[in-house]
Amino acid sequence: MSGQKLESRTRRKLRIRKNVHGTVERPRLTVFRSLKHVYAQVIDDDTQRTLCHASTVGAAGAELFKGLSKTAQAKKVGELLAGACKERGIARVVFDRNGYLYHGRVRAVAAGAREGGLDF
């Protein structure tokens, strides 16, 4: 990623984070996307703890995501994260797009999480 692109995303990220804060009742769902993978985690900012996470990386993920497009993989990550949140009793979150446009894989993670039962 070029320096200017990364700097612009970092500025957008900080601008978003001024307003988006995760609490115990409503933790923050944040998304990170690399060129190959998608990572999503639910964070309680008050205690600075990650409550649950899901990504396309890992031994179990290799066969689970095989043959899917990157957007379909992102949607599956959202569904897996929603399932992990339900196990922990989390139903409502705030969405943090992490400086990325709400488009493509970021949007797919959000759609998958909503379909999985998360409310945001």
Image (cartoon, helix red, strand yellow):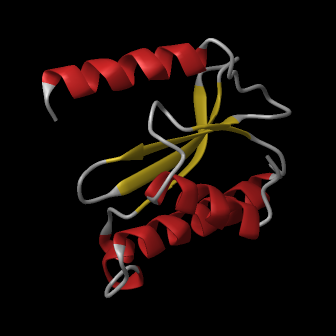
In the image, residue 17 above or below residue 115: above
Task: Give the x, y percent position of residue 67.
Answer: 32, 88
Say if 52 sits above or below 10 in the image. Answer: below
Of residues 53 and 72, the one nearer the viewer is 72
Q: Is residue 79 above or below residue 86?
A: below
Residue at horizontal 13%, vertical 29%?
2
* Residue 91 in the figure: left or right of residue 28: right
Q: Residue at x 62, y 11 (%)?
A: 18
In screen coordinates, is 31 left or right of 35? right
Judge by depth and name the residue closer to the eye, 85 or 36.
36
Among the 4 quarters of the image, the one containing residue 73: bottom left
Give the residue drawn at x 33%, y 20%.
8
Q: Residue at x 58, y 21 (%)?
A: 16
Instruction: Indicate left or right for 106 with 51 as reference.
Output: left
The number of numbered badges drawn on the structure is 0
Across and down, in percent, residue 112 comes to 63, 66
Q: Nearer the viewer, residue 16 or 85?
A: 16
